[in-house]
């Protein structure tokens, strides 16, 4: 099967290279903002939107009108228009599906600066050739595999990075056998990042929540306060913004390193993963400011995403419960169901008298029902619940 993999490395950039990167990113941003302005204007005046091909045909005229665009690789400008077109396609698709659409926004200087090459990039050792820029060195921590399809140069924190999107052909994985000994139920939370019940004995394991942002919150607040005091668009303001951006990038990298290592460890130790579906966007909207920050800091979405694609590539099984399945309300011993407010951390069953940690009970229920989907067993109450639309499994 053919897969896409991304390889991201930090660039050892000189002053000349940084100036070129800023020039290319600025041109890509200018083209995107101009395209968005004209699309919005055409929609208001004529009720129609411009297409990518119409805007792409204007690039030749623009290069004559603005000679500085001739220094930029043509495909970098075309990719900027393609990104804008993709944003509008997503916008209209969300409208058709009845979702709340997010209208494309204008890009700001210094925020997510980037540009992309669809082809023409060559890699030799720890160097990459970028058309109209030249050879640049990067910190090559691992070998590239497959064929380079796209190359993106992006600015994060206070450094430039190069990201290669490679297409690689790998053998179809052999599906792992259905064995409860290698199954695990996973319940994610805030006090404890993940509570797992594994094997036939439902062995308990708890992964502590690292809380990377919370540990660095005092410094983030301090840097934010210093940045707010600077005169806008001044050199001191730019320096303060870079310090703040660098610290946020550090927290992001710590969280990404944690989720990658944890998901890899779980993939090595288990073959069947029974997880819950989380509507994180709705949780962030409905929760208070402090709770929303804690949910974002936990990084559940990133962890579950890593777990899913790594399981797919290694032939492991993922059973995902529907987002309305009441795993925390069902007794893992007698399958009695009762209301469980969020503040209650111990599950006390009124039917059989079981007293158990709420998250551990949820993990056991998820594993039991996940195994029943892969290898049907008699769970009358659960199967009855599964027939209801709100408790559907994916």
Image (cartoon, helix red, strand yellow):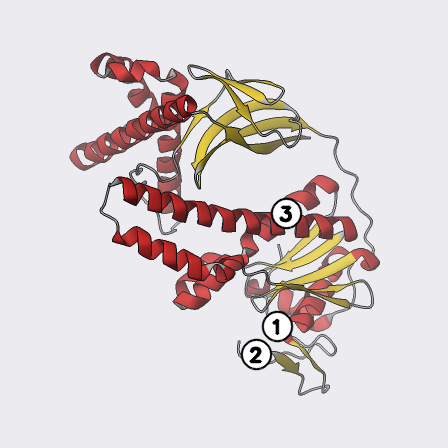
Find numbered disc 3 in the image and state the secondary structure of the residue it sits on.
helix
Name the residue carrying label 3.
260
Quarter in which the C terminus is drawn: bottom right
Between 226 and 263, the one lying in front of the other is 226
Query: Closer to the observer: label 2 or label 3?
Result: 3
Q: How far apart are labels 3 and 1 at the CA level?
A: 27 Å
Residue 333, image quadrant: bottom right
Residue 84: image location, x then y, percent:
35, 32
Where residue 234 sits in the image (x, y, percent)? 24, 41
User: Which residue is depicted at the point 64% across and 43% down?
Assistant: 309
Q: CA distance from mark 2 to mark 3?
A: 32 Å
Task: Find the residue positioned furthest to the front.
Answer: 236
Number of marks present in the image shown: 3
- The single residue placed furthest to the left in the displayed view is 45
Q: Mark 2 or mark 1, which is nearer the start of the sequence?
A: 1
Give above or below for 353 relative to 23.
below
Q: Is residue 207 above or below residue 1?
A: below
Q: Secondary structure at mark 1?
A: loop
The image shows residue 126 at horizontal and vertical percentages of 60, 23
Tag 1 and tag 2, C-beta contact below 8 Å: yes
Residue denoted by label 2: 340
Disc number placed over residue 314 in the picture, else none = none
Image point (69%, 30%), residue name: 1
Question: On the rendered structure, is 97 left or right of 255?
Answer: left
Residues tagged 3 and 1 counted as in contact (Cβ below 8 A): no
Query: Which mark is drawn over residue 328?
Result: 1
Residue 47 visible somewhere in the drawing: no
Q: Residue at 29% of width from left, 45% of height from top?
A: 237
Identify whether 246 is placed above or below 356: above
Image position, residue 323 (x, y; %): 55, 61
Rate crowding at label 3 as few (under 14), some (14 to 19) or many (20 or more) other CA atoms within 10 Å.
some
């Amino acid at each position: 099967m053919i897969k896409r993999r991304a390889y991201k490395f930090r660039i050892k950039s000189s002053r000349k290279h940084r100036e070129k990167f800023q020039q290319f990113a600025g041109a890509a941003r200018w083209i995107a903002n101009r395209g968005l302005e004209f699309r919005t204007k055409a929609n208001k005046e004529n009720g129609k939107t411009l297409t990518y091909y119409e805007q792409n045909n204007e690039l030749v005229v623009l290069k004559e009108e603005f000679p500085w665009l001739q220094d930029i690789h043509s495909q970098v400008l075309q990719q900027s228009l393609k990104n804008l077109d993709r944003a509008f396609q997503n916008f209209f698709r969300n409208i058709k599906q009845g979702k709340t659409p997010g209208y494309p926004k204008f890009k700001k200087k210094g925020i997510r600066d980037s540009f992309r090459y669809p082809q023409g990039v060559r890699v030799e050792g720890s160097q990459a050739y970028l058309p109209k820029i030249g050879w640049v060195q990067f910190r090559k921590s691992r070998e590239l595999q497959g064929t380079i399809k796209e190359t993106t140069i992006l600015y994060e924190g206070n450094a430039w990075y190069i990201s290669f999107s490679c297409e690689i052909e790998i053998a179809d994985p052999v599906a792992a056998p259905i064995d409860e000994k290698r199954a695990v139920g996973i319940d994610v939370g805030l006090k404890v990042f993940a509570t797992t019940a594994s094997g036939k004995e439902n062995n308990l394991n708890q992964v502590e929540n690292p809380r990377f942002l919370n540990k660095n919150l005092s410094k983030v607040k301090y840097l934010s306060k210093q940045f707010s005091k600077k005169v806008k668009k001044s050199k001191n303001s730019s320096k303060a913004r870079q310090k703040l951006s660098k610290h946020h990038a550090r927290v992001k990298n710590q969280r990404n390193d944690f989720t990658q290592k944890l998901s890899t460890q779980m993939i090595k130790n288990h073959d069947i993963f029974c997880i819950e579906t989380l509507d994180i966007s709705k949780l962030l909207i409905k929760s208070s400011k402090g709770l929303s920050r804690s949910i974002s800091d936990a990084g559940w979405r990133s962890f579950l995403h890593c777990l899913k694609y790594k399981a797919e590539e290694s032939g492991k099984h993922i059973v995902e419960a529907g987002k309305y399945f009441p795993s925390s309300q069902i007794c893992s011993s007698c399958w009695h169901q009762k209301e469980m407010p969020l503040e209650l951390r111990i599950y006390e069953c009124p039917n059989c008298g079981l007293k158990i940690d709420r998250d551990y009970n949820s993990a056991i229920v998820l594993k039991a029902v996940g195994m029943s989907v892969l290898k049907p067993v008699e769970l009358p109450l659960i199967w009855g619940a599964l027939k209801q639309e709100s408790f559907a499994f994916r």
